Image (tube, rainbow, N blue to C red):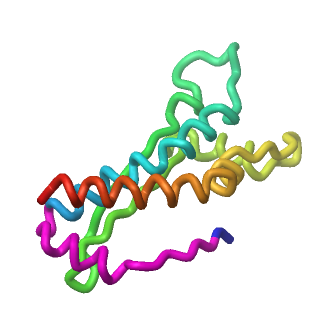
Amino acid sequence: MITMGVSGLAELERKLIELGEKVGTQVLRDAGKAALEPVLEDMKQHAGFDDSASGEHMRDSIKIRSSSSKSKGNAVVYLRVGPSKKHFIKALAQEMGTVKQVASPFIRPALDYNQAKVLRILAVEIRDRIENKR
């Protein structure tokens, strides 16, 4: 389990509310995507690749995806980084292993290794984007 300590969320929420829901959600989405860039690159670097396979490779389908919803009046942004649904089984097999395939994790290590970097980038990006929207 990945555990991260974050402080100042009440102040962040006030600043985002000042910007308005639509702009605040966009600030979070853009900052989150920028922060997850190191995880994306790490995953792509360590994802399996088969030269003999035709069509899209799992490595090429790894992207940062976002969605948002309203939860108790607040806008919530969800960000995911990983392969497309089409490559889910292949990614799971590489990550966890199978009877015939030894596990070669690339998703969890990318998250674990870049955790501190993601938090640093996220803090800087949110601060810069809030200041530039005023």
How many circles with numbers are drawn on the protein?
0
Give the x, y percent position of residue 104: 80, 43
Question: Where 13 sits versus 68, above or below?
Answer: below
Query: Where does the image place residue 46, in percent across and percent down from the top left?
Result: 70, 35
Q: Residue at x 56, y 53 (%)?
A: 117
Percent across and percent down for residue 89 are: 63, 45
| Residue 62: image location, x then y, percent | 52, 38
Q: Which is more toward the observer, 47 or 128?
A: 128
**Quarter of the N terminus within the rendering:** bottom right
Q: Nearer the viewer, residue 31 or 56?
A: 31
Q: Residue at x 66, y 40 (%)?
A: 90
Residue 9 forms part of the magenta stretch:
yes
For the residue pair 91 and 63, the one nearer the viewer reads as 63
Name the chief secondary structure element in magenta. Answer: helix
Does the magenta run of residues contain 132?
no
- The magenta segment is 3-22
Name above or below for residue 77 compared with residue 96.
below
Q: Quadrant of residue 87?
A: top right
Is residue 124 shown above or below 87?
Answer: below
Residue at 48% x, 49% y is 36
Q: Quick one: quadrant of the C terminus?
A: bottom left
Q: Is residue 97 left or right of residue 21?
A: right
**116 is higher (above) or lower (below) than 85:** below
Residue in view at x 38 percent, y 62 percent: 78
